[in-house]
Image (cartoon, helix red, strand yellow):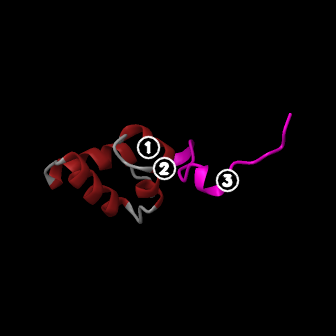
Amino acid sequence: MSNITQPEFDRPLVPTTGMRGEIARRWGKFSDREIADLKDKDDLVDRVQAKYQLERSKAQRDVDAFAKGRQL
């Protein structure tokens, strides 16, 4: 078996576990880069609103229900 590692540019930017991994599964339209670049919950609300063309209040409710008090 070879010990060759993937080049860094081929590795996913988002871990498959933890909150960012959950974001990737919940909102599949986001790229790994978009998820990796998220700053905070408000940023996620803004991006969900834009990517899914939702009203801000709907995006806020969706993110709040998803986050359940957790921070990014």
Q: Residues within 10 Å of mark 3 (few under 14, many from 20)?
A: few
Residue linked to disc 2: 20
Q: Is residue 33 visible?
A: yes
Which residue corresponds to the image point at 60% horizontal and 50% vertical from the top-left?
10
Location of the N terminus (image quadrant): top right
Image depth: mark 1 or mark 3 in front: 3
Q: Residues within 10 Å of mark 2 (few under 14, many from 20)?
A: some
Q: Is residue 65 above or below residue 39?
A: above
The residue under the point 79% across, 46% down is 4
Task: Name the dominant secondary structure of the magenta segment.
Answer: loop
Q: CA distance from mark 2 to mark 3?
A: 22 Å
Name the amino acid, label 1: Ala
Residue drawn at the location 43% of the way across and 38% of the way down: 25
Identity of the amino acid at label 2?
Arg
Helix, strand or loop at label 2? It is helix
Label for residue 7? 3
Mark 3, secondary structure of its residue: loop
